[in-house]
Image (spheres, rainbow, N blue to C red):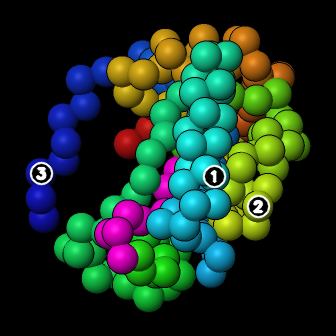
Amino acid sequence: MPARFSRRRDTAAIVERMGRVRLFAVFVRPTAEYDVESERGRDLMLDHLDWLLDLEDEGRLFAGGPLRDDGDDDENEGDGAGPEDAPSRESGVNATGFFVIGAASVEEARELIAREPFVRAGWRTCVVHTWLLNEGITIAVGRRIEENFGGPGPELGTASWERTDEAGKGA
């Protein structure tokens, strides 16, 4: 049996460092109409990029960009969820992507995404997920976005491993 990882921090210190920053992850996929090689497609791409820059200027855009299939993960091949399932493009540009934004609620996030030019034109579909940024060096940036655009903090229960009382210190 492998040796147990040697934990250096106690439960309270671990829980305190968790960011618990609520943001929204948006995954976009092209529809059959998506064609950035066309004149309309080029215009929509510039409108899309301008829309993202507006979100960035507002301080609402945390991150974004295309997802590429690196060809080294066969586990999800063909499940309809990854970039490898997106329609192929002569340009080699993959239209599957994601971005993370700040909003007061999932409804507000969906309203923002409904204004995205490719989505409005029916050239992309999107799925919005609530995302809790818990770890990483970007927590401070996420907190600024959440403070400016977020609603009430996420409703989270306390998992048994999070308890800092004697009962939570178990094995």
Callout 2 amino acid: Ala
- CA–CA distance in space, label 2 to label 3: 55 Å
For mark 1, what is the residue? 44
Relative side of 4 to 65, left or right: left
- CA–CA distance in space, label 1 to label 2: 8 Å
The residue sitting at the bottom extreme is: 78
For disc 2, the neighbor class at 10 Å (few under 14, some 14 to 19, many from 20) is some
For mark 3, what is the residue? 3
Which span of residues is magenta-colored? 90-98
Residue 160, image x, y percentages:
58, 41
Relative side of 136 to 63, left or right: left
Q: Residue at x 65, y 76 (%)?
A: 33
Disc 3 or 1, which lies upstream in sequence?
Answer: 3
Callout 1 amino acid: Leu
Callout 3 amino acid: Ala
- Residue 56 occupies which quadrant of the picture? top right
Do tag 1 and tag 2 residues touch (Cβ < 8 Å)? Answer: yes
Q: Residue at x 76, y 61 (%)?
A: 121
Q: Nearer the viewer, mark 3 or mark 1?
A: 1
Near-viewer residue (62 or 29): 29
SS label for mark 3: loop
Whether residue 2 is in magenta: the answer is no
Residue 16, image x, y percentages:
50, 16
Disc 2 or 3, which lies upstream in sequence?
Answer: 3
- CA–CA distance in space, label 3 to label 1: 55 Å
Residue 47, image x, y percentages:
64, 42
SS label for mark 2: helix
Disc 1 or 2, which lies upstream in sequence?
Answer: 1
What quarter of the picture does the C terminus occupy?
Answer: top left
Q: Residue at x 52, y 63 (%)?
A: 36
For mark 2, what is the residue? 121
